[in-house]
Amino acid sequence: MASHLLPLYPDKRVFVVESEKQPSCSTFITDGLWIATGGKNGCFNAQAVKVLAGRDVILMPDLGATSEWQEKVSMLRPICCSVSVSSVLEDVATDEQRKQGLDIADFLLMKDTPQMILQRMIDKNPVLQKLIDELDLVLVDES
């Protein structure tokens, strides 16, 4: 775990990711520190996580690894102020994205697909989904 910034920002929450791509995450989400484990299991062990003592921690697993990371909570709970596992990627991912095992950095750097744009439109106006269903409309990708 890259932990050199933790002492400099003792009050910031910590986002833990698998990949060393965390600097790209900090560009988009600035209200916390981003550290990496160096892989799904990486240095995710009792000794390494001691640097997170007293911190609010949010685990951000890659797609497909959420349940494995949920098991890590019991290791962190005794030393951290709070620990949670984000399911945001699992909540928004397509089947193809799940197959690819994308991570938070992949999503933050991704160009919006037509499906993503349509979903945001539906989220803002749920009646749009009813219109799509009633008229049997399909999304056509013109690329």
Image (cartoon, rainbow, N blue to C red):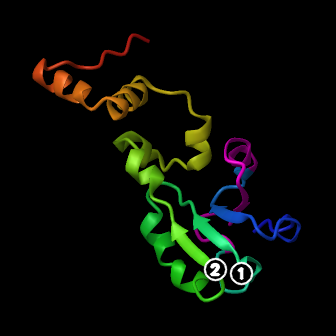
Q: Residue 75 placed where, x, y %?
A: 58, 85
Q: Residue 120 placed where, x, y %?
A: 40, 31
| Residue found at the very far top of the displayed protein | 142
Checking the image for residue 54, the label placed there is 1
Q: What residue lies at 57% left-to-right and 84% top-to-bottom?
A: 77
Q: Residue 129 placed where, x, y %?
A: 23, 29
Q: Are marks 2 and 1 in contact (CB under 8 Å)?
A: yes
Question: In the rendered image, is residue 38 in sight?
Answer: no
Residue 117's place in the image compared with 95, above or below, is above
Residue tagged 2? 81
User: What's drawn in magenta, residue-wise?
Assistant: 23-43
Left or right for 62, reference 13? left
Label 1 Cα neighbours within 10 Å, binned few <14 / some 14-19 / many ≥20: some
Q: Which amino acid does label 2 sit on?
A: Cys
Q: Which of 36 and 91 is in front in this view?
A: 91
Q: Residue 135 placed where, x, y %?
A: 13, 17
Residue 31's place in the image compared with 134, above or below, is below
For the residue labelled by badge 1, is the local secondary structure a helix, a strand or a loop? loop
Q: In which quarter of the image is residue 49?
A: bottom right
For the residue labelled by badge 2, is the local secondary structure a helix, a strand or a loop? loop
- Distance in Å between CA atoms under marks 2 and 1: 5 Å
Does the segment drawn in magenta span residue 4? Answer: no
Q: In which quarter of the image is residue 58?
A: bottom right
Q: What residue lies at 57% left-to-right and 74% top-to-bottom?
A: 83
Q: What residue lies at 68% left-to-right and 47% top-to-bottom?
A: 25
Question: In the rendered image, is residue 93 in sight?
Answer: yes
Label 2 Cα neighbours within 10 Å, binned few <14 / some 14-19 / many ≥20: some
